[in-house]
Amino acid sequence: MWTEEAGATAEAQESGIRNKSSSSSQIPVVGVVTEDDEAQDVFKPMDLNRVIKLLEETDKDGLEEKQLKFVKKLVQCYQNGLPLRDLAQIFKILNLCSGKIKNQPRFIESAYDIIKLCGLPFLKKKVSDEITYAEDTANSIALLGDLMKIPSSELRIQICKCIVDFYHAEPPKKHIPGYQQASSSYKIQMAEVGGLAKTMVQSMTLLENQLVEKLWVLKVLQHLSTSEVNCTIMMKAQAASGICTHLNDPDPSGQLLFRSSEILWNLLEKSSKEEVIQQLSNLECLLALKEVFKNLFMRGFSHYDRQLRNDILVITTIIAQNPEAPMIECGFTKDLILFATFNEVKSQNLLVKGLKLSNSYEDFELKKLLFNVIVILCKDLPTVQLLIDGKVILALFTYVKKPEKQKIIDWSAAQHEELQLHAIATLSSVAPLLIEEYMSCQGNARVLAFLEWCESEDPFFSHGNSFHGTGGRGNKFAQMRYSLRLLRAMVYLEDETVNKDLCEKGTIQQMIGIFKNIISKPNEKEEAIVLEIQSDILLILSGLCENHIQRKEIFGTEGVDIVLHVMKTDPRKLQSGLGYNVLLFSTLDSIWCCILGCYPSEDYFLEKEGIFLLLDLLALNQKKFCNLILGIMVEFCDNPKTAAHVNAWQGKKDQTAASLLIKLWRKEEKELGVKRDKNGKIIDFENLPGLSAEDFVTLCIIHRYLDFKIGEIWNEIYEEIKLEKLRPVTTDKKALEAITTASENIGKMVASLQSDIIESQACQDMQNEQKVYAKIQATHKQRELANKSWEDFLARTSNAKTLKVPSGGVVTVESTPARLVGGPLVDTDIALKKLPIRGGALQRVKAVKIVDAPKKSIPT
C-alpha cells in the first residue's frame, strides 16, 4: 500500500486535479470518496489512456521502470474493485503487459497483479452499466483464456484462481459511495458470451507434463461445465476426448480423475449427448476408461474410489450404446463380462483372483450396473461368443431360485431380492440370443420351478423397494412378472426345441392353473401388475399352441373358460388405462391361436355363448379391436354351428348381427371417403379427382388385376403341361380352353376400353384445339375491326379529301313549342315548373322530321 502523501502526489500529477483541502492528511485514499468528489466522478484517479500510451512507447531510457511504476499505481488504485466502465482499458493495459513478458520478464508480476484484480467484484455506477458494458466485459474476460499461452506457471495458476472466484463471489472490501457490486452471476454470464470455455479447453494441450497447472485448469472447466452454454462450447472444442485420453495420467492427489469424470458427466448431461458419445467412441478413449475402471475395481477400497468406479462404469455404459464404439476391440467387453460374473461363476483369471464384493451400497450398485451393461452389450451380435465364454446364462440363473435359509448370503434380503429381479430381467434380453446355453442350463425347468414357488403359499416377505420390484411388496408378483416375461421372450423365438420342451414339462397346464389362481384371488391394489401377468400368460399359451392341434387340445375347456372370463370384463374398464386393452388383445390372440382349428374347443366356445361375447365386443365400435374380432368371426364361420349363434345374437335396441356388420361397413366407407347419394347409391367410385387419360388407362388394368393374375397362373399351368408333354382328359381340356378364352376375352375387353378412352381423349383434345383456334380467330377479327375503326377516325379528322365529301341528309329541328318554355325570354325556373312530368321523366315531343329544305340544319 502506498502512503497517503505519495497517493496525493500521484493523483495531482496524473489527473491534474489538486485537492483544495488545507492539509495532506485530509486527502482521501483510493476508494474513499466524499460527496463533492463523487459529484466530480473522482473514483477514476488515473488517466488510463495515458498509462496505455506510456506502455505503447519503446526505446526510451528508464522507460521500463516508469511503466512498471505506473502499473503498480494502477493496481493500488483499483484494490477494492473494477468499475465496468474502466474494464476495457484495464484489460488493454493487461494485454500490453503480457506482450512485454517475453523480452521483459519483470512484467510477469504486473500482469499477475492485474489478473488478481479480476477476482475482485465488478462495480457499476448505474443499473444499466451491466448492459452498456456487456461487450467490453465479455471480451475482457475472454482475454484471460488467451493469456494461458504465456509459459508462466504462476500466471496460469492465478488466471485459474481468478476464474474460479467468479463462482464464489464476495462483497467489496470497502463500500464505495455511488457504486454497487454487479450481480453475482454477471461474470459467469459474460464468460459464456466471451467463449472463455473454448480457450480454457485449448490450453489443456499446453500442459501435458505440468500436473499442478493441469489440475487448476480442470477445476476451472469443472466450474464452467455447470452451464449448458459452456458445455456446448466445450463439446465443440473436443473437450470430451481431450479429457478422457488423459484419465490415466500420473496424479498422486486423485483430483485429475475426480474432476475429469465430473466434467464428462456434465458434458453428457448438458450438451449434445450424441456428439459427446461420438467423441468418446474411439480406441484411445475406451482404453483409458478400461484401465481406470480396472484399477479402481481391483485396487479401489475407499468409499470415494468405489463411487468413482461406478461413475466411470455409467459413462462406459452410455458409450456402449453406440454400436460403432470399439468395445470388443479394446478388450473392455470381455473384462466387463468377467467382472459381472466372477462372484457366481468361479474364474481363474488373475484380474478377479481373490476379489470379493461387499454388501456396501457402492458394491451393490456396481452389481446392478454390471447387469445393465450386459443388456447393452448383448445388442452387438459379435458379443454373443464372449457371453458364451463368460458363462453369463449360468451366472444369471444362480438367482432364479427360491431363497435358501441354510446358505450364507453376502447380500441382505432386500439386496438379494433386487438382484434376483434384475438378473431375471437381464435373462429376458440375453437368453434369446443364447438358446443352446439356455437349454444346457435347463432354463425351462428352472423358470417353471421358480414359478411354482411364486404361486405357492410359502411365507415370503418381499420388500418391493426397487424399480423391478414395483407392485411386489409383501407378495411374489414381481418375481412372477419377470419370470413370465422371460418365458414369453423364449416362446416367441418360435424355436421348436424350446417350445416342445416347455410343453413336455406341462407349461400349458401350469399357465392355465396360475391364471385361474389369480382369478380366484382378486387383488385390486396391484391390479395393473396382475393384468400384465394375465396378458403374458395368454401370450405364452398362444405362442405354444399356434399351429399345433395337440397342444390346442391340451388347452381344452379349461383354457376356453379363462378366455371367456376375460371377455366378460366390464367394457368400461377398457378406458381405465390399467392394461385391460392389452389383456383383451392377448385374449383375442389366444382365441385365434388356442381355440380355432380345434373342433371340441370351438364347440365348447360356442356352447358358452362365446360368439355372443365376440359380437358384444364388436358392438363397442372400437376400431383397434374390430379387425381382429372380424377375422376370428370369419374363421369361426367355417364351423356350421356358428351361423345359428350369429343369427340369434341381439344387441342393444334389438340390433342384429347383420345390421351391426352393415353399420360397420358404412363407417368404413365413410372413413375411406366413399360418397353416396340420398338413396345410398355410390356416386364416385370412378369419379377420382386429378386423373389424366393415361391414369384411366392404367385404372382399367387395376380393376382387372386379379383376373389377369388368375389368367397368368392358368397360362403357366398350360405351358407346364405342354412342356411335360401331358394330355389332359377331355373335360379338363375343355375347362382349360374355356378359362384361357375367358382370360383372352377379358384382355381384349380391357384393350378395347383403353382404346375408347384414348380415342375419346383424342376427340376431346381436338375439340379443345378447335375452340382455341376459334378464340384466336375472333381475337384477330376484333383486332382488325378495331384497326379499321381507328383508320376511319383518322381519315375523318386528318384527311382533307375525306373532309370534303358530303355528309348525307339534313335534319331539321323545329323550335320548341311555347307551351313548354313559356315563350321567349321567359324565366327559366318558371319554365321548368311548367314541364310535364310523368313517372319522373319528361314528355317526349314528336317535333322532328326530315325535309329537303331545312330551316336550321346540322350534319348528322
Image: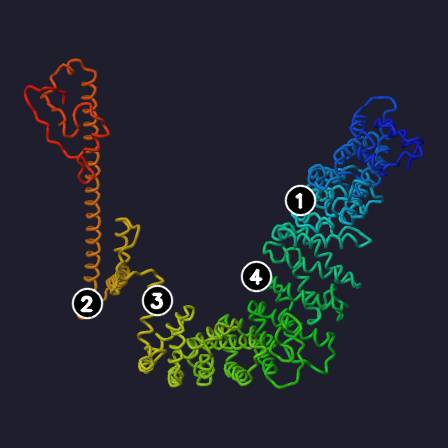
Of marks 2 and 1, which one's residue comes earlier in the chain? 1
Secondary structure state at the residue bearing disc 3: helix
Of marks 2 and 4, which one's residue comes earlier in the chain? 4
Q: Position of residue 773 (x, y in %)?
A: 20, 36
Q: Is residue 794 left or right of residue 440?
A: left
Estimate how packed mark 3 is, as few (under 14), some (14 to 19) or many (20 or more) residues with alpha carbons within 10 Å: few
Residue type at tag 4: Leu
Q: Position of residue 315 (x, y in %)?
A: 67, 57
Q: Position of residue 26 (x, y in %)?
A: 92, 34
Secondary structure state at the residue bearing disc 1: loop
Estimate how packed mark 4 is, as few (under 14), some (14 to 19) or many (20 or more) residues with alpha carbons within 10 Å: few
Q: CA distance from mark 4 to mark 1?
A: 34 Å
Q: CA distance from mark 1 to mark 3?
A: 59 Å
Question: What residue would you read off at disc 1?
Answer: 237
Question: What residue would you read off at disc 3?
Answer: 667
Q: CA distance from mark 4 to mark 3?
A: 47 Å
